[in-house]
Amino acid sequence: MPNDATVTAADIARLAAVGRAAVSNWRRRHDDFPQPVGGTAVSPTFSLADVEDWLRGQGKLTDSPVRERVWQTLRAAAYGDVELADVLTFAGAFLLYLRADPGHWRDLSSAPDEKIAAALPDAVRAHTVLMPDGPPSDAVPLVRALSQLVDELGVAETFEFLRTRYLEHHSRRVYLTPEPVVRLMLDLGGPARTVLDPACGTGAYLGMANELFKDVEELLGQEIDDTTARLSAIQLALRGAPAEIHSGDSLLADAFPGRTVDLVATNPPFNDRGWGYEQLTGDPRWEYGLPPRMESELAWLQHGLAHVRPGGTVVLLMPPAVANRRSGRRVRSELLRRGALRAVIGLPSGAVPNMAVALAVWVLRRPSPGDTPADDVLMVDTSADAENFPKVALNAWRRYNKGKGDGTDASVVIRIIDLLDDEVDLTPARYLPQRTAPASEGSFTAAHEVLLTKTAELRESVAGLSALTQAEARDDVPMTTIGELAKAGVLQILRPPPKVRIGEGTVPVLTLEDVAQGGAPTGTAAPDGDHVTITAGDVVVSLSARHPVARVMTEDGPALGMGEGGPVLGPGEEAPVLGPGLALVRVEPTRAAPDFVAGWLLLGAQGARLRSSTSSARFDVRRARLPRLTLDEQTELGEAFRRLTDLESALRETYDLGADVLRLGLEGLGAGTLRPSD
């Protein structure tokens, strides 16, 4: 196995089971931390062997370096992302061969590399049709590395590890449904012997169905992305699942025409304007009405109903707008009248990450001939119990099926006739008023202790600043502007496209309010090639003089989250894009310090606010002034600027904690569950 494998900061964080910020701290604080051997100033790479030795010496090594070597060997066998998919497919095909005939590989592995290279293609093809056109040119080091990892993990887990790394590498194009949501949807629709996922993606529903349903006989899947479909097929095959996976668009080119199953479970594409409205106007699947052009979700819903046997179940993840869009009212009415819709279950916000809205699960059942149409629908709202939402939803569903769906704090059974009004609104929260439970002594005490701890920590957030004497003060420092630095190539100034429609699509959008509050992106937008994607080290600044704010994205990951210093970028999620009213300053870190630039932009924005006389005044980023200093001087000042903005985030968090303590105390005293103490 090669010893010249390299790793990124993210890989090091995985090896040590820490966040990426910890790796950055190690680099700053430990002089003996391995130096970069490649990459760029923003994304350096390090020798895996050196990193492994350092982590082991520090007692921080938690993950297997063998995995990193295998992944780097696989990447070295590919030239570009397209070939990386082919190499990964070959790795999966080799693992299928290894699973089917381990004895043959044991005999072959002792042969010279030339003999292995000659025998490998035919040996692999004998056990799978998923073999690509040919193995990579340097396949022998790869298969030897794979066989070592198989000894540690097994064939299925080896491929799962590689596939997960690949999906992280392509997180923008792959959407992952969280496991609790997948399990809940299968529990709502199961047990089943035959299952179809017409938008199967990475195969999460089919893979879990194979584990969850004891007597499963057939798993069918279709995925529009050919690479994702191949990887899902390999993973299911390695787990011995009776799966049949095809690539293609399920709505426009159904791979399973005329075939029916017990259960259709899927997370279909949302807000897809190109789902095929013009081509499919007269399609026989639209039994409950032609889906409106802007309602692709209702097309997927009816596609599912067309593929289940009479009495079969369809469970779909849906955006909340499907429940009340006026354009879909006629289809919703028909689903109710014919008894196809059985339940709508609202999920808590955040149950599906990277979605700015709380999604819902729709449960439908294809009526059997001669059945009396159902006359009621179960509505469940799990938003009040984010930790236990699967249990809340499943208990309500089971009670309803047993005829005991009288309603609870989280569920209610609604007569269909009461839903067939001018709106046909199927939003569960509309029928379930939220109830706030009085505070218990335990919850108040815990919140109070957290507040006291946070208050004590505030002192650590204050930057240490000392006054200069008149002799020490410098008034001769030459100044420049952001615009001049942009012309010199020190930084770039980027702005979002003119029309970013917030609320459409699933691409996360960072809004002005998100930046001001130091929070995660709350907006969404449709995909657009002109979007400005936010990356590590970018400075996001408000263009409104009335709302001065400038922040540095402080982690090198693909999606916004919350960190101690405000918004950060975290691993494994879709990259956010820049929203309206914001600009992005992308600094070349070898020539300028991002925190330093952000600090002076904030000073400029605050000055613009003081000078503005109208609420519509704009802050001209290009004219913002800053001193010409060495990179070391910039870094020192930037650290002070950052600690001051950290203080702002700490104060905001303390305020929120204090508000919680106040609310819990008032509720507890009012309900008689709390009393004064000494």
Image (cartoon, rainbow, N blue to C red):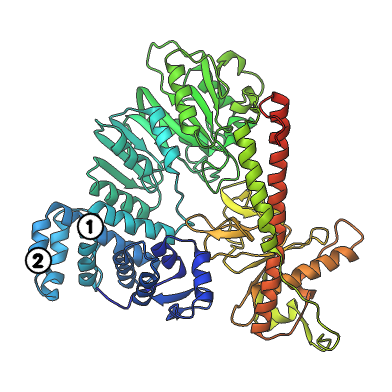
Please determine whether, in this image, residue 30 is positioned above or below residue 348: below
**In the image, what residue occupies the spot 72% across and 28% down?**
669
Residue 321: x %, y % from top left: 60, 35
Mark 2 lies on a secondary structure that is: helix
Q: Residues within 10 Å of mark 2 (few under 14, many from 20)?
A: some
Mark number for residue 108?
2
236 or 307: nearer the viewer = 236
Q: In this view, does 191 lie to the left or right of 9?
A: left
Q: Residue at x 64, y 51 (%)?
A: 453
The reply to whether the C-beta atoms of the residues labelled 1 and 2 are less than 8 Å apart is no
- 153 vs 492, left or right, is left
Farthest front residue in view: 678
Tag on residue 373? none
Give amino acid for label 2. Leu
- Rendered residue at 46%/17% (across/down): 400
Q: Position of residue 410 (x, y in %)?
A: 56, 25
Say above or below: 475 vs 285.
below
Is 484 left or right of 538, judged from the image as shown?
right
